[in-house]
Image: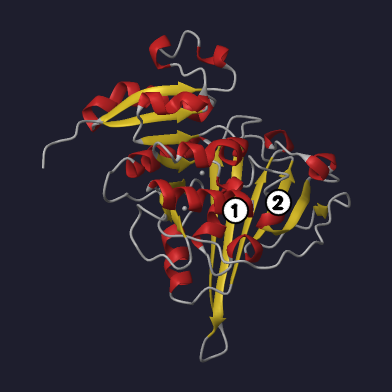
Amino acid sequence: MANRGPRRVGVVGYGRLGQSLVSRLLAQGPELGLELVFVWNRDPGRMAGSVPPSLQLQNLAALGERHPDLVVEVAHPKIIHESGAQILRHANLLVGSPSALGDQTTERQLLEASNHWNHAVFVARGALWGTEDIRRLDAAGGLQSLRVTMATHPDGFRLEGPLAEAHSTGCRTVLYEGPVRGLCPFAPRNSNTMAAAALAAPSLGFDGVIGVLVADLSLTDMHVVDVELSGPPGPTGRSFAVHTHRENPAEPGAVTGSATVTAFWRSLLGAARPRSPGPGLLCLQSPAASSPPGRGSISAEKPPPSETRSSDWPPTTTIPVLPCPTSPGSPF
């Protein structure tokens, strides 16, 4: 079969992560068989002087004119809500804001568009350490509970709605503890690791995986992610359990940790493979689907004594559990 040429990649979003990806694509893309064909940002002025004018896309709806093979979203969940299905008309989609999939309507629209246009949706696993192990344990029926705690300095949060009104009441304050689906709308940029966990464990999904968001005044230069999981009791009555603790250096007030940038680049390289997506990815697919990524698939410790809980945000709503699609997926 003749070589079809380099894979054409478009980047949506030009914040810290988008800037890093664009820089790498320009510098390393040609030798890796990748060609950057456009960059879009909600504020076009941010691209001035750093993105060649010929690569600046002014209207996201016109991305089809650039004929991309893969579109990489590193902007905001709103882009997936508003344009995800349209992007799938033209290319495979790598979602960098998986919290968008906590919205069931968005998830359904992406699945339908994926089926209709025969394009896959990949989800970067980001800061979720041990994704493949979680996925395998869940597939084998050995996962009973999964809890993801994300802690950082309050300046690192970009919160919305009622959660934006929650206040730290001590050195360490739990702002939210409950189903991941309930957190995604109010912490869309700080719940992506938890959303990745929900996609890695479809038997629990967004309603069964527990997310905990913690404001910690001592964490001025890092994001800390704790993942706790357990299986059903064994013959002795004891349960299999794992607890990982990950410290990701971050600039003060930054939403994205330093290790995330490198991890996301690996996810991009995996999604760009035309036939066999590599590690660093989650694949979401409809519950009945068993085909590989392609048509019909979306390829997605105890608290210290000083900890207090915010009285402004007690999540009490219980959402009915619905099956949440998946397949493969390393650090945010």
Could you tell whether 115 is left or right of 165 in the image? left
Q: Amino acid at mark 1?
A: Met
Residue 137 appears in the picture as rendered: yes
Say which of 283 and 250 sits in front.
283
Q: Position of residue 186 (x, y in %)?
A: 73, 44
The residue where tag 2 is placed is 183
Name which quarter of the figure residue 28 lies in.
top left
- Asked if residue 281 is positioned above or below residue 207 in the image, the reply reads above
Name which quarter of the figure residue 272 lies in.
top left
The extreme front residue here reads 116
Could you tell whether 237 is left or right of 28 in the image? right
Q: Position of residue 226 (x, y in %)?
A: 59, 56
Distance of mark 1 from mark 2, alpha carbons?
9 Å
> Which residue is located at x 35 percent, y 28 percent?
67
The extreme left residue here reads 1
Secondary structure found at label 2: helix
> Which residue is located at x 49 percent, y 45 percent?
126
Could you tell whether 150 is left or right of 68 in the image? right
Q: Amino acid at mark 2?
A: Leu
Q: Position of residue 70 (x, y in %)?
A: 37, 36
In the rendered image, which quarter contains the N terminus? top left
The extreme bottom residue here reads 235
Q: Are marks 1 and 2 in contact (CB under 8 Å)?
A: yes
Q: Earlier in the sequence, mark 1 or mark 2?
A: 2
Secondary structure found at label 1: helix
Q: Which mark is residue 194?
A: 1
Crowding around mark 1 (Cα neighbors within 10 Å: few <14, some 14 to 19, many 20+) is: many
